[in-house]
Image: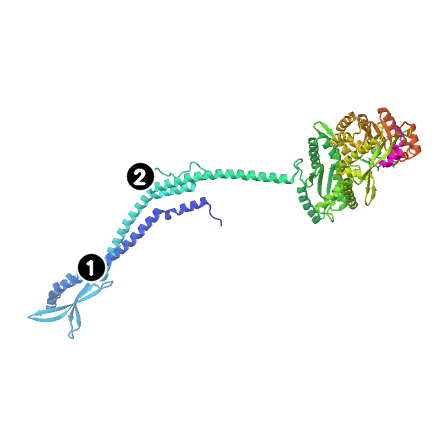
Amino acid sequence: MSEPSRGQQGVIRRLRAPLRGIGARLFLFMLGTSLVVSTAFAAIEAWAGYRGQLAQLDREVEQLGRATLEPIALSLWNYDDAQLRLQLDAIRQRPFIASVEVRELAADGSDGTVRARLGEHAAGESRTERLPLHYRRDGEDALLGSLLLELDIGAVQAEARDRALGILFTQAGITLLISLVLLLVVRQIVTRHLSALARAAERFDLRDESSSFRVRAPAAGGGDEIDRVMDALETMRSSLRSAYRDLAEANTKLQADIAARLRAEAAADHLANHDALTNLPNRRLLFQRLSHELAVAERSGTHGAMLFIDLDHFKTLNDARGHSIGDAVLIEVARRLRSQLREVDLVARLGGDEFVAVLPMLGELRERAAANARIAAEKLRLALAEPIVVRDEVFRLSASIGVALFPDEHGTPENLIKYADTAMYQAKTEGRNTIHFFERGLLEAMEERHALETDLRHALSEGGLDMAYQPLVDAHGGVRGAEALVRWTHPVRGPVSPAQFIPLCEESGLIIELGDWVLRTVLGQIRAWREAGLLGPQQYVSVNISPRQFRAPDFEDKLIKALHAFEVPPSMLVLEITEGVVLGDIDTAIERMKSLRSRGVRFYIDDFGTGYSSMAYLKRLPADGLKIDKAFVRDLGTDANDAAIVDAILAMGRHFGLTVVAEGVETEDQARYLITRNCALLQGYHLGRPTDATRFATSFLRQGTLA
Ligand code: C2E
Ligand code: MG
Ligand code: MG
């Protein structure tokens, strides 16, 4: 059974009140006490009365004896029975005499016959008094018989009892009356106020300003105890109220503090687990969730996929257009990724332009999961390829996506990210804007690349790199200059092609350091050749500048300073750039080219015809020359298409007033073909292989026609 509520308890108390109330208890106490006292008093009264009566009876018997014995003895002597009866009747009239009789003395001295008798035997207790009847005559005393008085003791007792009861009832009546009056008085001056106080206390509510313990006006002629209780309760109420107000105030403050702290904690927690820019989960949260997803996948036997998403050429855009544009693009990318995926999928930003999507529960069969992962990745790729508009400017991005399925035998979260990253890297080398699934072989390749990069870094700082120079020859066989090509001989692997390690440097950023080294070395070489009179002012050395190097904010500054430092006229330096330079942000690239050209530095577009070569670019780029890629030159004699492309490039160059250089000229036929079509300069094994500076000087510069 449940405990009665506070309200119910009040009701129960009130129901018991008539019996439990102070008035009632006082009443019962008085009644009880006076009843006990009255009863005792009545009993004593009765006992004393009874004893008194008995004594009185004894005295009466004695008196009776003195007054009546002689006349009765005379009547007995005279045989005057009538007189005897009269005498006995007179005795019998007296109180408490039940019966009276006269017996004659028998001859043997014992009680003889009854001469007269009056009255009945007492119904209750009785006592018989025997009084001797003597007859005196002439100085002689004769015992005639005895007078037997039967005393009615029961009647004496009854009378005493009746008196006692009378006393008792009177006392009880008076007590009852006084008690009742007292009850009313107590109720009037005490208990009704106490009850009112109790009700006030029951109703008392700290929040209620109007609740009060002033249940009555102060008693006339100074405060009584009730007034003192009321005052005390009022004082208590007001101090409780002020304590309550303080407490409520403190509580409100505390609540606010707690809420603020909770908010701060939630915010800190969010901050610790989310990327501030995109509000996506960060690496930390990714690892947490990933461990969980891997465990679930393992247990449930379903497969999922991790997608590693890297934006293509984002760094170019960020460097060229500033971080605020970059940030806006990243926010939009994050939004697109999130909007393309399911609720259960997790999209996180690892940093920079790297995002990760974890897609759990793609299927129970690995093949099915792979197919679903490809569909999802394709969706993301397409979503990211849509133009992004930032501040009314349209940007076209693409993404390379690597996919790794899980669970995997070595599938720790770290490994899984490495796998997806590796696959992404492969997607990049496959020409970007593609999706690649992770295969075990990839990882080894990646590790190999990594090792190569470490060795290259080492070579760069330890002087393990060299420059080779390849002659650039005009239609008359005159050496007009050289292309500087970097060379690296690996201590174990032997010579490593720049075609292999330059892209590696591009990716890692090492290209900046390497590019600086190349520029310094080449400029130093130009100065040396000039000072030795081997290189004239009409000749030049062309240096390959990779896109990332060109886009570096301080590139122009560094170049100008280096030209000054090595006292090389800018006209003796040609920068070979590829169309990759302008990808992302053509305007800034054009600005930079214009600025450098105004100082006399020339630009040739390298590998022309392979990349995105578009007429639009060509028209806008302030270039001085073109280099026809060796791929078109190689099949000049055999492939009509290549011949047509070469012809078109030559025509284009003429049209825009550009110097055209043909690379990879390996045969006499190729050279003749190009010369007859007015190709300004030739470069290739047929005219001279790249070689070190000393040999280049002896082989080409001493004999070269100094213009
Ligand atoms: P590239 O600028 O197109 O350089 C021409 C490449 O063609 C050189 O390869 C050269 O050795 C090769 N070559 C020259 N004549 C012939 C020929 O007749 N037949 C064939 N098959 N090839 C010929 P290399 O030295 O391996 O360089 C490859 C690429 O590496 C270069 O292509 C250039 O893009 C890059 N590279 C080389 N050195 C540097 C450098 O110092 N800085 C930068 N950023 N890139 C460099
Ligand atoms: Mg080149
Ligand atoms: Mg080239």
Q: Quadrant of residue 414?
A: top right
Residue 575 locus on image (x, y percent) = 80, 30
- In this rendering, the answer to whether 52 lies above or below 658 is below
Q: Nearer the viewer, mark 1 or mark 2?
A: 2
At x 47%, y 48%, the residue is 3
Q: Is residue 206 left or right of residue 45?
A: right
At horizontal 17% and vertical 70% (from top left) the residue drawn is 113
Secondary element type, mark 1: helix
* Amino acid type at mark 2: Gly
Q: Earlier in the sequence, mark 1 or mark 2?
A: 1
Q: Is residue 700 magenta?
A: yes
Give the x, y percent position of residue 586.
76, 28
> Which of 515/608 is in front?
515
**Which of these two is toward me, 121 or 423?**
423
Numbered disc 2: secondary structure? loop
Disc 2 beta carbon < 8 A from ligand 1? no
Q: Quadrant of the C terminus?
A: top right
Marking on residue 222 = 2
One can see residue 343 in this view: yes
Amino acid type, label 1? Gly
Q: Is residue 256 left or right of residue 57?
A: right
Q: Position of residue 622 (x, y in %)?
A: 80, 26
In this view of the protein, which residue sits in the foreground, 251 or 199? 251
User: Label 1 to label 2, Cα distance in Å?
Assistant: 56 Å
* Res. 303 in view: no
Q: Position of residue 164 (x, y in %)?
A: 25, 55
Find the residue positioned furthest to the left: 138
The residue beneath circle 1 is 52
Q: Residue furthest front?
A: 532
Magenta residues, as a range? 690-707
